[in-house]
Amino acid sequence: MAELWAEWGNLSYLVAAFWAFFEGETFVLFAAALGRTQGLVDPWILMFSVWFGSFLGDQLWFTLGRRYGTRMVKRVPSGEKRIGTALRMIEKYGTLFILSFRLVYGVRNIASIACGLSNISRLRFALLNFIAAGIWAASFVAAGWFVGAAMAEHGFLLVGGILLGLVVLFFVGRAIWQRRRAATVTT
């Protein structure tokens, strides 16, 4: 990451925008942490770059969902089930779902397609997507910045170990929750 910014300079922000077009959470976290620890990355330019990239990516998925959604979904084996779940969430939570779906890892692209399949207007989705992309960009840049600060102060191994432990706890907790949920459904 440091080599990217050292060699490419300001063009690296275009790489960040492109990365955020598709997903980009990890990239943004590392870039922001790099900015804090080595001063190679301006957090404001990074935030606006990934905000724009993320916004455009979701607009594309929304448009593809609106135009080709049902045909696209039928071609992906697990697509119908995942889109159906997202559509139910849109019906139940509406605006809140659009503002928050990008904060849940692995949901973003499916959710944008589902929004395109729903009765949400293009203008409403664009406005909410713009706000949500800004929240996402600011959150991940800030998180990376603060993690970088903690690493600079307490050392990479300590902070990295704590973060790894939290990630493991998250996945173990999720696995337990899914097993309990599956057991409840079958009984």
Image (tube, rainbow, N blue to C red):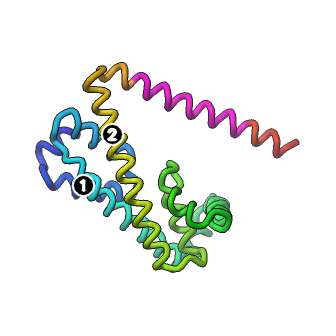
Disc 2 or disc 1, which is closer to the eye?
2
- Residue 88 placed where, x, y %? 68, 64
The residue where tag 1 is placed is 15
Report the Cα–Cα distance between label 2 and label 1.
17 Å
The mark total stands at: 2
Identify the element where label 1 is drawn: helix
- Residue 46 placed where, x, y %? 25, 52
Amino acid residing under circle 1: Val
In the rendered image, which quarter is residue 49 located in? bottom left
Query: Position of 133 compared to 156: left or right?
Result: right
Residue 74 visible from this viewpoint: yes
Identify the element where label 2 is drawn: helix
Amino acid residing under circle 2: Gly
Residue at image x 48%, y 72%?
125
Which span of residues is magenta-colored?
161-179
Residue at image x 28%, y 42%?
32
- Residue 152 placed where, x, y %? 25, 26
Query: What is the chief secondary structure element of the magenta stretch?
Result: helix
Quadrant of the snapshot with the N terminus = top left
